[in-house]
Amino acid sequence: MKESKVQGQTPIEDLKELRNYFATHNVTREYIAHTSKVHSVGWSCDGRRLASGSFDKTVVIFNLERSRLVQDFVFRGHTGSVDQLCWHASHPDLLSTASGDKSVRIWDARSHKCAAAISTKGENINIAWSPNGSTIAVGNKEDLVSFIDARTYKVVTEEQFNFEVNEISWNITSDLFFLTNGLGCVHILTYPSLEQQTVLKAHPGTCICIEHAPGGRYFATGSADALVSLWDTSELACLRVFSRLEWPVRTLSFSFDGRLLASASEDHIIDIGDTETGEKVAEIPVQAATFTVAWHPSRYLIAYACEDKEPPERKRDTGNLKLWGLSNN
């Protein structure tokens, strides 16, 4: 416990203080991880490990040692692109991955073994592990969502949707299931009954991504209209809209305290906004479209990975991931 206290950070309440903090903590480090593009990055719940999944079919585990990532292990086994990954919300060793090879895999980062391989229908593109740990939801390219019992590693139910399902997510109590669709809507279903509770018209354009804040107070949606909407979870009301990006928003992440929201797209910046006011706190300059961002669960650190569309001379950087928020000193 001592170590996590040292590593953890006290939330900064004041907007000016936050801006000052990131003015002196804006260094990026780059790490070689994969041989082709990184689709997804995510932190274990204790913040000691970072996982990355790639088009090269592998999953790489890094350990965070002080303010440096050290590669620990490469998981091999998927025969298709690893499109999304998701850690268990309270078990820091367990990781789930969704792949185009029509399977979901559960990995144990401590034993370096694959704990389970679950066959699913169709090429999987997104995955979400319920916060209570009991269920893994996985969506495929045909808009079929399969729900896997995390104890038996069996598919317990499947739901075919008649609209384009872009991303899936759970609320903090694991009894509501959220889907974003191609018509700019967020569908909210009760779980496990999967009865539709409500449909939010969130955006005029395709609703691409959704993210719930730690603590459950907010969720955010990102859209092809380049807007990010911040929602009050209990009221299902839109609190504010972030409009600093100019391209479709691909990925979102909340900081551990729910105060900061990172949004990324094909813009050459990752925007970091204040959830209380909507104002900009900081930005991360990038050279290409960003696929995935993830705030650390107890520190103001962001892991992210960009597209490969860079000049030929930068081709050696293909498959790298980056860590931002390090001290300038």
Image (cartoon, grey):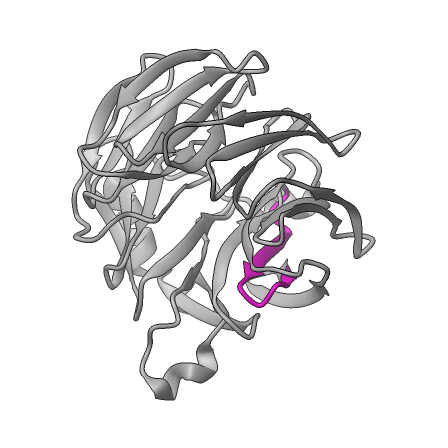
Judging depth in this view, the residue of 33 and 149 nearest the camera is 149
Residue 8 % position (x, y): 55, 44
Residue for point 38% across, 35% down: 210
Residue 298 % position (x, y): 53, 43
Residue 77 quadrant: bottom right
Span of residues in magenta: 46-62
Q: Is residue 139 left or right of residue 75?
A: left
Q: Residue 217 in magenta?
A: no
Residue for point 19% across, 43% down: 225
Q: Is there any visible trace of residue 214 in the rendered image?
A: no
Which of the image's four quarters has the C terminus? bottom left
The relative height of residue 296 versus residue 149 in the rendered view (above or below) is below
Query: How many marks overall?
Result: 0
Residue lying at the far bottom in this picture: please name it: 313
Judging depth in this view, the residue of 90 and 94 nearest the camera is 94
The relative height of residue 244 versus residue 178 in the rendered view (above or below) is below
Q: Is residue 150 left or right of residue 215?
A: right
Residue 290 % position (x, y): 35, 59
Q: Residue 56 in magenta?
A: yes
Residue 179 % position (x, y): 42, 29
Residue for point 33% across, 52% down: 21
Which of the image's four quarters has the N terminus? top right
Judging depth in this view, the residue of 61 and 298 nearest the camera is 61
Q: Is there any visible trace of residue 18 in the rendered image?
A: yes
Residue 193 quadrant: top right
